[in-house]
Image: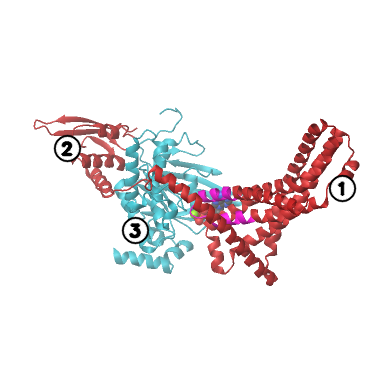
Amino acid sequence: MSASQTIAYNPDYDGPIISVRGLRNSFGEQVVHDNLDLDVRRGEIIGVVGGSGTGKSVLMRSIIGLQMPNEGEVEVFGQHILGKSDAETIEIRKRWGVLFQGGALFSTLTVAENVMVPIREFYPDMDREFRREVAKYKVCLSGLPPDAAPKYPSQLSGGMRKRAGIARALALDPELLFLDEPTAGLDPIGAAAFDNLTKELQQTLGLTVFLITHDLDTLHAICDRVAVLADQQVIAVGTIDELLALDHPWIQEYFNGPRGRMASSGKKMLG
Amino acid sequence: MSIPSDFVEETAEDGAVTLHFSGDLSIASIGDLPERLRDFASQAKRLDISGTGYVDTVGAWLIHRTARDMEAEIVGADDDAERLIAAVAGADQATEIRPDALNPVVRVLGEIGESTALAFTTLTGLIGFFGAIMVGFFRLVRHPGQIRWNAVIQRFDVVGVRALGIVGLMSFLIGLVIAQQGAVQLRQFGAEVFTVNLVGRLTLRELGVLMTAIMVAGRSGSAFAAQIGTMKLTEEIDAMRTIGVSPIEALVLPRFLAAVIMLPLLGFYASVVAIIGGGLLSWVELDIPPATFFARIREVVPLTDVYVGLVKAPVFGAIIAITGCYQGMQVKGNAEDVGKRTTAAVVQAIFLVIVLDAFFAVFFSWIGWN
Ligand SMILES: Nc1ncnc2c1ncn2[C@@H]1O[C@H](COP(=O)(O)OP(=O)(O)O)[C@@H](O)[C@H]1O
Ligand SMILES: [Mg+2]
C-alpha cells in the first residue's frame, strides 16, 4: 500500500470480528457506557437490544469510529482502530458497510448514484461502465424494483429508503454490516421481507451482521445471538433461550412481556 | 492481501474458446479485468472459474455479465460462487442510473418556458400569499386574544434588536463615505458646505432605509425561508395544520409583523447613525463643529424626507417577510431545495425592494415631495 502506516487488512484473521473492551462513553455528566465489553463472531447475526437511549447507536458509532470514546479499546478484524486517522483505517473501512438509523441517503443523488459513491471513493480506478452495472445490480439485489434506481430518495417510501440504504451499505461487498434499527417504521410484511433479505445476504455473502433492533420478530427470526444493553454495559450475550434462563428483570420483561411471548409463539408455530 | 484476478484464453481443436480465470474475483482485486473482457474481441464458449480464489458479488457479476454477453457457459464454480452468480443473475434487470435526459434544444426551450411560467406563478403566488396574510391578520384583529405575543416579541428581538449592531456599523461607514466623497467633489467648486445637504438628504430619503432593507433581507429574509423550509421538510407544518394551528398565523404573521414594524425603526436608526458618521467626518475633514452640523441638517433637510423614508420602510419590510416566508412554504423534497429557496427569497426580496424604490422615487417627486 502507498502509505506505510496504513493498517493492512488481514484475510487470514479468524478471531472475533469485533472486540470491544472497557468502553466508556459519556456526554457531559451523562455516562452512556461504562466498562462495556462485547465480542462479535465471524459470520453471525448479532442482535443488539436495549431500551431507548441506552446507547445502542452510540455503541455502533464508537465501533465505526464516528464517536471517540473516553476510554476503552475497539478492535475490528483484529486491528485496533481507535484514534487512527481515516487514511490509516481505509483498508478496514472498505470491509464494512453501515445503514444509519435515518437511512442517511444523499438526497441530491439518485439511488443508483448513492450506491456508486463509496465505489468511486474507494476504487476510483474501476471502469466507469462496470461501476454503473455494479450499482444497478446492487439496487436490484437489495430488493428494490428496477425503476427505483433512477429515483431520488425523496421519491421513495420509508421501506424503499431502507433498502436503498442497504444497497449503499453493500456497495463494497463488505464482510461486516452494521444495521441501526432497519425495520423500525416498516409494516410487518415489509419488516419480514427485510429480515429475509438480511438473512439471505448473510448466507449468500457470508456477512457478519451487527443489528440494532427493537423488533422482537427480527430477533427470533434471524439473530444467532442477542446482546442486551442495560446499566451502561452489555449485561448478557447469548441465544434467546440462553437469555431467558437468566433472571434479570429487564430481560424477563422484554422477552416474556406480551409482545415477547407473541413473537416467540409465532416462531414456534412457523418452525 | 488479495491476489489480482486475470484470465488466459485457450482454443480447443474444434475452435471453441475457453477463458480460464485465476486469482481472487473480488472488488479489491478485479482491477482492469472489466475493460479487458469488454475489449476481448472473439467469443468464448466457456468461462472456467475453477482456478479462482475468493469470489464476491462484484466478481460474480463480472462472470455472469460476460457469460450473458458471450452466450458462454460457466464451468468450475464451487458452491459459494454458484450461489453468488445465481444471486446476481436474479438481480440482473434493465434499469437506469439517472432519470432520462432530454435533447438539448428541447431542454433549453423547456427551461425558458419553465422560468417564464415560474416568474408568473411566483408573482401571483406572492400576491396570493399576501392575501392569505391579510386574511389571517384581520382574523386576529377581530380575535386579539389569539395573537401569539410571545412569537411576535421574539421575532422583534431577532429581526430588530439583534440587527442593531451590524446595521449601525454599516450605516456609520456609509455616512462616512458619503461625506468624504462629497467633500472631495464639492470642494472643487468651493461648495464643501453642501456636504451636509448631501449626507442629510441622501441618508434619510434613500440610503438609510434601502441599505437596511438589503441587510434585513440577507439576515432575516433568508432565515425566514430556511426556518420555514426546514419545518416543511420535517412535516412540522403538516402537523400544525392537523392540530388546527394555521401556519400563516403561527409562523408567517409574527415574522411579517416583525419585519413591517422593525424596518422603519431600523431604517430611521440607520439614517441617524449615518448622519453621525457624516458629521464626524465633516468635523475632522471640513472643520464643521457638530453643533453647526446638526443645526444645518435641521435647516436643509425637509421633514418630507423623513416621511419618504418612513413610508417606504414598512413596504420593504413586508416584501422581505412575504418573499422569505413564501419561499419557505414552497420547499419540498430535500435539503438542497431549502438552499435554493433561501437564495431565491433573498434575491427576489432585494430585487423587488429596489424596483419599488424606483417607483417610490417617481411617485414622491410627482406629489411634490422633493
Ligand atoms: N451527540 C450527543 N450529544 C449528547 N448526548 C448524546 C449524543 N448522542 C447520544 N447522546 C445520548 O446518549 C444516549 C444514548 O443515545 P443512543 O445511542 O442514540 O440511544 P439508542 O440506544 O436509542 O440508540 C441518549 O441518552 C442520548 O441522549
Ligand atoms: Mg438509536
Q: Over which residues does the magenta segment extend? A: B321-345
In the rendered structure, which amino acid carries the disc numbered 3?
Ala
Q: Chain A hue?
A: cyan
Residues flagged by tags 3 and 1 on a common chain: no
The shade of chain B is: red
B327 part of magenta stretch: yes
* Residue B328 visible to an observer of this rendering: no
Residue B38 relative to residue B114: left or right? left
| Secondary element at image label 1 | helix
Q: For the residues marked 1 and 2, what is the alpha-carbon distance in whole angstroms?
A: 99 Å
Tell me the subunit letter for badge 2.
B
Which residue corresponds to mark 2? B46
> Mark 3, mark 2: which one is toward the viewer?
2
Residue B208, x across and y down, in percent: 75, 47
In the foreground, A182 or A133? A133
Mark 3 lies on a secondary structure that is helix
Note whether B146 is above or below A118 in the view shown: below
Residue B80 left/right relative to A223: left
Which chain is disc 3 placed on? A
Image position of A86 with respect to B159: above or below: above
Is B320 left or right of A95, judged from the image as shown?
right
Residue at the disc numbered 3? A193
Q: Does the magenta portion include B40?
A: no
